[in-house]
Image: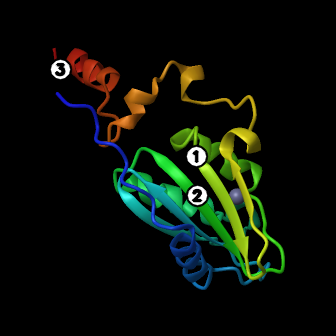
């Protein structure tokens, strides 16, 4: 059986920046007023997300995680590039929680922060989260979580086989 096909070439940074900017315009941020949009390029194409706040502040979800969770729910398992947009004079890097979630699906992901101004931060998740805890620490190989179809890796199949016998 052939390996999962390679991820298609990423759209231009400008296209991803515009997608993230559009997403930021849809943010739900009535408390902070700090709107953020994210565009992620994955093995299933482009997904976007915005921050979604909550009156119970701790339940707020960042734009990056919103986008990656939407991608994962659609079957994506590999994040190649994350572009974050904030309507601010200078760019904003992903928070610690988002760095961990980016690493889960994109241990080699490029991360670009854009803003209203011309400045950008272009980096990688490896630089943002050195020495990361990840799937390998729990014995999950990238191939296991590389196959789309949640939990259909060899281990999950083996568990199901045991259960039904
Ligand atoms: Zn975050």
The quadrant holding residue 54 is bottom right
In which quadrant will I find the N terminus? Answer: top left
Under tag 3, what secondary structure?
helix
Relative to 163, is 60 on the left or the right?
Answer: right
Q: Quadrant of the C terminus?
A: top left
Tell me which residue sits at (70%, 80%) in the image. 29
Q: Which image quadrant for residue 92?
A: bottom right
* Marking on residue 82: 2
Residue 98 drawn above or below residue 117 = above
Q: Say whether disc 1 or disc 3 marks the residue closer to the N-terminus.
A: 1
Q: Is residue 148 above or below residue 131?
A: below
Looking at the image, tell me whether mark 3 or mark 2 is earlier in sequence order: 2
Q: Name the residue rendered at 60%, 46% in the picture.
A: 101
- Is residue 48 or residue 126 the one in the foreground? 126
Residue at 41% across / 34% down in the picture?
Answer: 145
The count of marks equals 3
Alpha carbon distance from label 1 to label 3: 38 Å
Q: CA distance from mark 1 to mark 2?
A: 7 Å
Residue at disc 3, CB closer than 8 Å to ligand 1: no
Q: Give the residue pinned by disc 1.
A: 109
Q: Residue at x 75, y 41 (%)?
A: 127
Q: Earlier in the sequence, mark 1 or mark 2?
A: 2
Residue 77 in view: yes
Asked if 98 appears above or below 30 in the picture, the reply is above
Q: Where residue 56 appears, x then y in whole percent?
A: 72, 68
The residue pinned by badge 3 equals 164
Q: Give the number of the mark in front: 1 or 3.
A: 1
């Amino acid at each position: 059986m052939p390996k999962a096909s390679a991820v298609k070439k990423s759209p231009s940074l400008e296209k991803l920046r515009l997608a993230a900017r559009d997403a930021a315009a849809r943010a739900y941020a009535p408390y902070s007023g700090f709107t953020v949009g994210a565009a992620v390029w994955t093995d299933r194409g482009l997904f976007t997300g915005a921050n979604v706040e909550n009156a119970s502040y701790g339940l707020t979800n960042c734009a990056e995680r919103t986008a990656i969770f939407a991608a994962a729910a659609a079957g994506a398992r590999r994040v190649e590039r994350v572009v974050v947009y904030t309507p601010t004079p200078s760019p904003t890097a992903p928070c610690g929680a988002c760095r961990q979630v980016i690493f889960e699906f994109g241990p080699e992901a490029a991360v670009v922060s854009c803003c209203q101004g011309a400045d950008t931060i272009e980096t990688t998740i490896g630089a943002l989260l050195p020495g990361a805890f990840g799937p390998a620490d729990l014995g999950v190989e990238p191939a296991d979580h590389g196959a789309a179809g949640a939990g259909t890796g060899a281990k999950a199949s083996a568990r199901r086989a045991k259960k039904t016998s």
